[in-house]
Image (cartoon, rainbow, N blue to C red):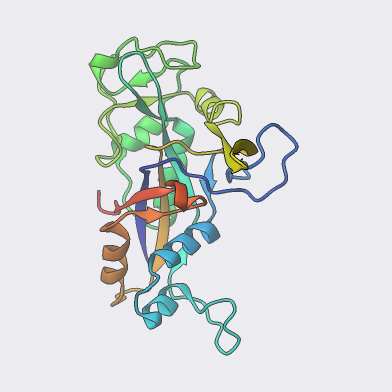
Amino acid sequence: MKAYIYQIEAISNLHAGSGEANEGVIDNLIQRDSVTGLPIINASSLKGALREHFKGQDKKLIEYIFGSEANDKEKREAGAYRFFDARLLAIPVRTDKAPYLLATSPLVLKDYLRTLGLFGLPVDKDLKQLAQQSSNTPKVTQSAHNQARIEDLVETAAYKEPLKGLPKWFCEAGVLLSDTDFRTLCDNDHLPVFARNYLNNGQSENLWYEQVLPRFSRLYFAVLVPDGDAQFRQFNAHITRSLVQIGANATVGYGYCRLTNVSNS
């Protein structure tokens, strides 16, 4: 099996719901990693979204990649491709020096490097060194953002030298936060929450409160493909040439994402 890594860039707010009952203020929470507690898109949700994206394509191709439909009693076979969870790589944070910067942390980068290592993909030495950095002071990638105040954080950002090691596909304007600060900005008190409403006899009534992963967030996932697979070129082209909708609320513009194959970046 050959591994490929894809980046997910959220073009609009994304809600991949956990499906769990919640007694707090937020009714519908997003999916989270059971170990780190960071936002995630479970492999089953991701695979389902990609399968839906192939709707209308050749049925044999769909069944080859994703497997037969669950309700197909005559033929229930697993697909040839193996899909893994989409893990968080960065979230946008507001600052006084730029509309937003893409924030990540050593914990996130180590997880990304671990994924590359597990699938035998090359690891950049500069990125490995960057993942080993630890500081309570946010570090920015551009001198123009030196001393930037990041919303909800006490420490101002510092720029001493370029942050080497971030993948070329990551971003131009980024900030490396401590693991503690990054987890804080990803918790239920800091991620965006929106009220969902509907009209009843001309009156607006609140239905529920829904948590989202904000637009511009970046995630990544791995796909295992049979060696020399003849269908991969078609699969890769179909998911990268147009936006893929992931998660709930497609009719109100949620979850539209750009996917990029970054395996060789």
- Residue 144 location (% of width, % of height): 24, 15
Do we see residue 1 in this rendering? no
Q: Quadrant of residue 187?
A: top right
Q: For residue 84, say whether it is visible.
A: yes
Image side of residue 53 versus residue 43, left or right: left
* Looking at the image, residue 26 lies above or below residue 122: above
Residue at 52 percent of width and 31 percent of height? 192
Say which of 26 and 191 sits in front: 26
Q: Is residue 124 left or right of residue 223?
A: left
* Picture quadrant of residue 113: top left
Name of the residue lying farthest toward the front? 201
Residue 70 position in % (x across, y down): 58, 76
In front: 198, or 217? 198
- Identify whether 121 is placed above or below 47: above
**Which residue is found at the position 46% from the left and 60% from the top?**
49
Image point (25%, 53%), residue name: 264
Residue 233 x %, y %: 26, 69
Tally of numbered tags: 0
Quarter holding the N terminus is bottom left
- Can you give x and y, in whole percent of width and height, for residue 234 in the image? 27, 71
Q: Residue furthest bottom?
A: 74
Looking at the picture, tell me which residue is in the foreground, 123 or 29: 29
* Residue drawn 37% across the image and 49% down it: 257
Vertical placement of residue 231 versus 106, above or below = below
